[in-house]
Every structure is written in C-alpha cells, then in structure tokens.
Amino acid sequence: MNDAFALGPPALSIEGLSIALPPGADRPHAVEQLDLKLNPGEITCLVGESGSGKSMVARAVLGLLPPRVRIAAGALRFGATDLVQADETRLRAIRGAEIGMIFQEPMTALNPLHRVGRQVDEVFRLHTDLSRRARRERVVQLLADVHLPDPERLYRAYPHQLSGGQRQRMVIAMALALGPKLLIADEPTTALDVTTQAQILAQLRELQRERGTSVLFITHDFGVVADIADRVAVLQRGRLVEEGRRDDVLRSPVHPYTRLLLAAVPRLQAPRRRAGNLGPPLLEARNLRKTYPRRGFGGSATVALDDVSLVLRRGETLGLVGESGSGKSTLARILTCLARVDSGEILLGGEALARLGRRQLRPYRRRMQMVFQDPYASLDPRQRVGDIIAEGPLIHGMSRAATRARVAELLNLVGLQETAAERYPHEFSGGQRQRIGIARALALEPEILVADEPVSALDVSVQAQVLQLLANIKGKLGLSMLFVTHDLRVALQVCDRIAVMRAGRIVEMGEAADVYAAPSHPYTRALFAAVPGAHWEQSHAAEPVS
Amino acid sequence: MRRWIYAGGRLALAVPVLFSIAVLNFFLIHLAPGDPASVMAGEGGSATPEYMAMLRHKFGLDQSLPLQLWHYVVNVATLDLGYSFRNDEPVLTLILDRLGPTLLLMGTAFVISVGAGILLGLLAGTGRNSWRDGASSILALLASATPSFWLGLMLIVLLSIRLGWLPTSGYETIGSFYEGRAYALDVGRHLIMPALSLALFYLALYTRVMRASVIEQMNMDYVVTARAKGQTELGIIFGHILRNALLPVVTMAGVQAGNLIGGSVIVESVFGWPGIGTLAFAALQGRDLNLLLGIFLVSACVVVAINLMVDLAYVALDPRMDM
Amino acid sequence: MQDALLRFARNRLALLGAVVLLLVLTMAAAAPVLYPAGAFALAGPPLQPPGGRFLLGTDTLGRDVAAGIVYGARTSLMIGVVATLAAVVLGVLIGAVAGYYRGKPDLALMRITELFQTIPSFILAILLVAILSPSADSEIAAITLVSWPGIARLARGEFASLGGREFVLACVGLGAGDGRIVFRHLLPNCASPLIAVGSLLVANVILFESGLSFLGLGDPNLMSWGLMISAGREVLRSAWWICTFPGLAIVATVLAINLIGDGLNEALNPRLRDR
C-alpha cells in the first residue's frame, strides 16, 4: 500500500496491529491487522467515523489505551524500539520527549488547579536537567512560538482563564516542547470553532514544516484532511480500507467506503436553486433582545441577542449560521417560545406571541415544532418511542386510539419500522434517534420546523441521510424551516437564505447563493475562508471530488 | 484576587444565618408548652418570681409576637443568652467555660477523620479492586454502621476495663496537678478514646468520598495528558490527582461540621468529657431548656465559623473560584 | 428496571445485606410470637450472663435482653422507614419546586436548605424532642426536620439538570403543562438516585434514632436499642452483654441497609458502576 519512494526510514511503522476490546463490546477488536507506515516529515491523516477505532490507534502508540483495552497482536516500530514490547520506563522516556500528543478536548486536557506555565514546564522537569530559569525561558519561548499573546502573563494563567483555542495551543506547546520526532494529534480541532480551527491547523502545519516533525493526525473530517494531510488512511470498523497520497484519495478514491464518505460531504458551492417567489411572511422577529444575567460574584452579563430582526417566509428554509456563543441557538429557542425574550416582538402569521402566557401559547405551539441537536438528550429515556411521538397529539386532545395510527404513519414517514414504537430510545443509533425526534416534531402537523444543529452530532454518512430526510419531508408537507447550524457546507446545501450571526447580532442576511458568491461582511468572508477544505476544494474545483 | 471577595461574600452570608438561627430559637421557645418565661427560666422551678417578672419585662412577653421576636433577637445579638438557675450562672459563661474541651475533641476528631480518610481513600482509589481497596472498603462499611456512643462503650470495656491502658472518662486525672508536658500528656490520654469514637464514622465517610473522587479524577483527560508527557504514576497521583480529588472532601468536611458537633454531644456524655455536650446532657436531665437553646445557638456559631474556614480552604485550593 | 434487578442480584454484598435485613424484619414481625410478654416484662433474675436460660442474658432489672432486641428492631425499623419517607417527601417537594421553577423560589428555598444543613442537626433534634416531650411521634418529627435538606439538594440538582435537557424542552414545545412535565418526565427520571439515597438515609435515621434514645429521648413505651445500651452503661464493668448485643444489632441492621443502598445505587445508576 505504501508508496515506493519513501523518504528514508518511516517515522513510525504500524505492523499487523490488533487492539482487543473488553468482552461485551460491540466487536472483539477495535482495530484489526492494521499496517501503516508514517513517512518522516509528513502528516498522515487517519480518517474514520465514530467507532472506527482511529482514536485507539493514537492511544496505542503511546501505550495510553483505556483500562481493559489491550494490544492483542502486532508491532509499533519507532526507530529501533517496538513500542508494544517496550517496558513502562522506556515508554515514559519516549512520551513527551520523542513522541508528543495532542488531545481532542482542550477544556479538560489541562489540570484545572495548576498554572498552565507549570504544566508546560512539567515536560522539561521530567525530561531535562535544565535550571528553573532556563526552563522558564524555554516555556515562555514556546508559548510565543505557538502564537499565544503575552506569554509572560499567560505563563501564570490558570486553564479556566483561557479560551478553548488558547488551551489547545498550550497543549500543542507541551507536545512540541522537546522537539519530538513524532506527534500524535487526536481530533485536535474538533471541539473548536471553525475560525479557531483554521488558525490551529495552519499553525500545526507551520510548526510541523519548520521542525520536520512527522504527524499522525486522527480526524473524522475530510475538510480537515484536505487542509492538512500529506497522506490519508481510511479506517472502517477497525480495518484499513484505503491509503494513499491526499490528492489521490480525495480525487479518485478506490474503495467504495471512501467514496461513500466523500460523497456524503456537502460541497462548498453556491446552491443552484434560487429562492425565487417566496410566500408571505410566516414568522417574524422584531428587535429581539436577550441578556443573561451575570453569574456569581463579579461575573458579567452575557448579551445573547442584540436587536435581532428577521422574517421567515412560507415555504422557505432560512439558515442561521454562526460560531458557538453567537446567539443562534438562543434565537431558535426564543422564536419557538421555549425561552423568554427581554424585549422585542415575535409574530406568527401576524399574531404577537412574545407576551403570551403559557396557556395562551398552547394553540400556537403546534404550529412551530423543534428538532434538537443532541439525539441522546432530546428523547426521554424512560418513555417508549410510541409514547414520545404520541405525546404532542395527546396533549392537544387526540384520542389514544387515533394517536396509535398516527405514530405508525409518522414512523413510516421518517423511515423507521412500526415496531419501533414499542422500544426505548437507548435501543436506537444516533441517526435513528434523530429520526424519532423529527417524527415527534411532525406529529403536531406544524407549519414551521425549527432545527437546531440537527446533524452536528452525527457521522457524515448519517448526516447526509438525515438531511435528505428533512428535505423530502419539507417538500412533501410544504413546511417552512429555520435551520440552525455552525457548518457552512450544510447551510449552503439546505438553505434558501442565510443569516450570519455573531455576538448576538445578525451581521449579514441574504440569499444563500449571494452570501456565498459575494459576502459583504468581513466576518462572513472569514467564516467561508475558514471552512475546512475550502482552499483545497477551490483549487481543485475543476476536477470532480469523487 | 477576586476569590477573596468571594470569601468575603461568604462571611457576609454568615450574618443572616446566625439571625435565622436566633429566629428559629425564638419559635422553639414558643413551641414549648407553657409560659415562654418559664421555658426561659428553666423548668427546674428554681427561678424566683422576681426573676420571672424581670424576664417577662425584658422579652416583652406581654407584647405582640413580632415585638417579642425583636426583643429576643436584640438580646441574642448583645450576647445575652439568659441565666441558668440550676447552675446559678449566666448561660453564656457556662457555655464558654465548656467550649474549650469540646473544640479540642472536635478538632482532634476532625484531624483524625479527614487525615486518615484522605489517606485510606487515596490508597483504595489508586489500587482499585486490590486488597487495599477491599480492606479500606470493609473498614469504611463497618465504621459507618457503628454508633459512636456504642463504640465508645466498647472501647471502654476493652482498653480501660480489660487492658487498663486508658482512663475510662474525664478530661484529666483528678487531683494529680500535672503541669506542662505532663498535663498535656494526661489530657491526651483522656482524649484518645472519645476522639476515636467520634472520628470513626466520619473517617468512613471521607474514605468513601475520597475514593470515589480519586477514581473519578483518574479518568480525567488531564491525567492522560500528564501520562503523555512521560510523568510517572506516582508523580501523577501526587502532582495532579491528589489536589483535585481533595475538593469534594473539603466540601464534605464543611457539610459535616454541624454533625460533628452534634456527635460530640453524645460522645462527651459517654466519656464524661466536660464540654458543652455533657452540659447539654445535664440540661436535658434538668429540663433547662434555655441552656439547651443557648448551646444550640453557640454550636451553630461554631459551625458557621468552621464553614468559613472550609470556604477559605476551598478558595485556596481551587483557582476557579476566581470566576 | 429488569436490568437493574439483575445487576442488584449479581452484587453479592448487596444480597448479603438483603438477607440480613430480611432476618431483622422477620424477627421484628415475629416479636409478639417469640416474646408474648413484651420487652419490658421481668423474665428472671437480673444480670444473668448470656448462654444459660437466656440466650443473650438479662439486664439490671431481670428483663430478657433478647426480647429487648427483637422489640427494639420494630422501633428502629418503624421510625427509620417513617421518618425517611417523610424526609423524602418533604425534600423532593422543596427540591422540585426550587429546581423546576428556579429563580427566586430557588434562591429562597436553597437558603433555607443551607441553613438547615448548617445547623447542628443532632442538637436541634434533641431540643425539639425535649420541647415536644419524648415520644415516637416527636422523634419522627425531629428526625424528619433535620433529614430533608440532603434530599432536597439532590432533588433540586436533578430537577434543575433535567429541566434544561432537550427532551423536557421538547415537551414544553409540544404544549405540555407543568403537571405532565413533572410527573411524566422529571420524577421518573430522577427516581433512581432518590431511591438509592433514600435507602441509605434509612440507615442513617436508625443510627440517629439510637443516639436520641441513648440520651433518654426515645418513646418511654417502646423498647429501643439505644435505650438498652444506655441502661447497661452503669453495669458495663460487670455485665458487658447488656450493652454489647443491642449495639451489634444496630451495626448489623445499619450495615445491611447500607449494603442494599450501595447495591441499589450501582444497579440503578449504571454509569457509576466503574467508580
């Protein structure tokens, strides 16, 4: 599988690696018979959906597998050492010094009680004999190297005082402190906003080039692959199905699974359809304001919505796009009257809702229904699926017998079997749960469907199916949709019009095609530029992706 | 330094707490059957009619309830807790005289239970499902099922009556007139059994909290980060896990302060330890309700003070209180 | 629920606890049959050591210690269960209101809860029983009054965290009223931790009650283990058994209930299993 023209001996050679899962797991091995060579000085992306075993590979390299997960067979050759056979003392000498690691969750990867400088310093304390002053200089230099502002001050900061991106930079600084030959990065940007992600990726790339580090980069996102990889290896349920140079794999994938994954990634392109003649305004927001009170002593109030107005027309899909904290989810909840607004007005078909009491709201509620982000938290674990879907109609006075037929009809509509009604949510996969959530929302025959990041917790192949389902249902039932997402690719695929939010304000709103082709606000431009894979896709636009 | 503002905020919160306890006391007096004056005078029947009349006047007992409450709170705020006719001394003097031994007993039990609990919890949590874990779990299970007063009696049977190692009761050897070190040693010998009896239940509690907390921390991402840096397991436990794992124990120590002082009441009465517990027991026997109310109030003050110290400890341990 | 039962049954310590508790329950139920004369009856000469005609000996007045233990079990279990139920109902009520409505009611109720957690609860209980005069009712009232705050905090935490979950929001969006949300969604979802903590509370209440009756604040008409231990104190030197056996009974019962509580906790909250 490996190219013949290797650039010297591989930085890491994974040979016949099998990782055994504890008894009772969904399969005996997380990874089976994996062969992979990392070229020196290159970034190799290991790609796969959740449960593919990709993170286990990353952890196995440093001997950091979770309890009860063990390496069943194979070798991990790093220079002259087989990391599988190496004893704990040898591994400790390698960890942090010769192999560095970056983790997915910057919020929890640092010890909350220690100053970050001390945590970076720990690497030097463990592996060098440098004096305290020399170490401090090195740490401050490192913080500057990863472009952290004011390194002297940040040295003394605690993790909770840093943003997610800053924390991840700290972890990168730690991993690169001693100039390791190999860097393992396990989804290092997945938890970050897209603009931060773009910065971190660019920076990783830069540092890697400067220092000639080899990188094993674990990710689920082909956009990230396009941005950063030299080589790509695709993992499907523990088996390597394809491996090759980035452009080859992205442009002409060989294995059907790779093709499927690539085809499921929404293209970053202007939608062909035009919104055209839209219906009358259905839902209107006028000058909405919402401030969350300050928390605890000395906390400051958060402005979630700052004078937001928008109109949703009958039959259209309006996308609300923004990064975390932009207020897009708050807006969705306020529009559906799940949260109260401080000032401003909400009009549904011309009727004002913002000041209505709970009881008065009830007749309007059935006209707007919501689909939530988290397929695990959005269904009551103690209720059967049938009861979950039937709850809305029951509240609004439908008889129990009638709801039974309705539930069956809805399950069919969202592509689930009728027998699903008798089962509990935990028996379903994430994608299936999201279908149940959609069925619940449709049970009241709403005119408006508000979808709050409905696919962001799903794997890309499942995401494509759920988006398809939403499109079908919308066409069939003539719904209007408000679609909240952080993913511009998804927004372009789904929405007729797009509103870009930042810090509680709508900074730009217009037809999706126009916003994509000629964004007027600099923030919109920055957002589009930061979409993972955007650059690669545009420079390869001539050739089809799959 | 925002966190010291936080600590100051906690201090300010102590005032309404103490005020509420005074109000609670007032309602307890009125809950008791009979004339509030006779409740406050103590039902020993030893109060003179003049004193009763004085009480009625002082607390405005012929006035409306809110006014009575006002009088009561003012009296409490000026540290006037009344007079105990049974003991022929002001309530506050009686209590303050006995507070020292109680604080000594509580403090010792606190140090034993927290210290040993942290140690055992750490041993159990880091060696999960090993013999260390098993042994400390069994100890914790037994200790949390054993009433302190019964444990105290059993210790007396074993260590005093059978083995004759330790004195059965009291604070010091009567008539020995020890001084300096010898006196401290003598008190220490008297202290061992009461402190152990009181500490054991809480030791079990802290062991369990610490064990759970250590295990939780061991699964945290930052531990993997430390491991990936090449840190040793011992380095991870003492450098990273220990301090994080202590936080729930500190919180629990604050919550348990009130129970610790309640527990010392009963242990003191077993060992004749001359603290406010023994005083409370005597007040109970003599139905000196006003003295009991005073003890309640003072011990609540002690708890509030302990909670403040716990808050300070927490603030010192956790930089996130800076929020 | 079946999974939970299975998990419980696989926990050997919890089963041991269940067996011991069953024994204590049987003993308590069979008390009138075993000792028809009651616990206060003079059965023979005083201070008989255990082993002879009296299995566990007799006390200073010649009452059978074994009879006292059997009748004491009735008192302990009755007060343990009733006071726990009352505390759970009160605590859930307060915690639910605070956690569900948040805002000002939450702030006020939590201040009160904190106050009750700060107060030295045993001393407050002594005061209350002394004021109300010792009886089973006043013991239960006092124990309830000092036991609810823990439950209230737990219930508040559960209600607050569940209340923000998306499935509850979805239900609000469907137009459901408070009653439906609380009784159909929130209560069933926080039942597991409440059951687990409630069962542990029974054990603590029994310990608490034994302390009260040791100080002479128990119901004078009911035999209790604390009372027996307190009565045997004076003759500790010569008649060790009078104090020892009731104490062992307390330890066994409380231990059994703790084991069951731990087992329930692990069975009902499986995410804690690895802890």
Image (cartoon, rainbow, N blue to C red):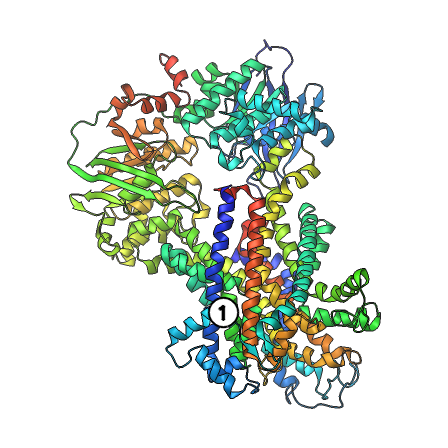
Q: In terms of depth relative to the viewer, which is nearer, A357 or A417?
A: A357
Residue A293 falls in which quadrant of the image? top left
Helix, strand or loop at disc 1? Answer: helix
Q: Mark 1 Cα within 10 Å, few/some/many (few <14, many 20+)? A: some
The number of callouts visible is: 1
Check the image and report above or below for A196 versus A2: below
Residue A406, given in percent of the width and then of the height, sits at: 28, 50
Q: Quadrant of the C terminus of chain A?
A: top left
Check the image and report above or below for A282 versus C144: above
Q: Looking at the image, can residue B208 be seen?
A: yes
Q: In terms of depth relative to the viewer, which is nearer, B28 or C103?
A: B28
Check the image and report above or below for A229 versus C262: above
Residue A537, given in percent of the width and then of the height, sits at: 39, 17
Residue A530, given in percent of the width and then of the height, sits at: 39, 22
The disc labelled 1 sits on which kind of residue?
Val
Q: Quadrant of the N terminus of chain A?
A: top right
Q: Is residue A276 left or right of residue B263?
A: left
> Measuring 24% from the left and 44% from the top, which residue is drawn there?
A343
Q: In terms of depth relative to the viewer, which is nearer, A147 or B126?
A: A147
Q: Is residue B111 left or right of residue A286?
A: right
Residue C197 falls in which quadrant of the image? bottom right
Q: Is residue A256 left or right of residue A5?
A: left
Chain for numbered disc 1: B
Q: In terms of depth relative to the viewer, which is nearer, C191 or A178?
A: A178
What residue does disc 1 label? B76
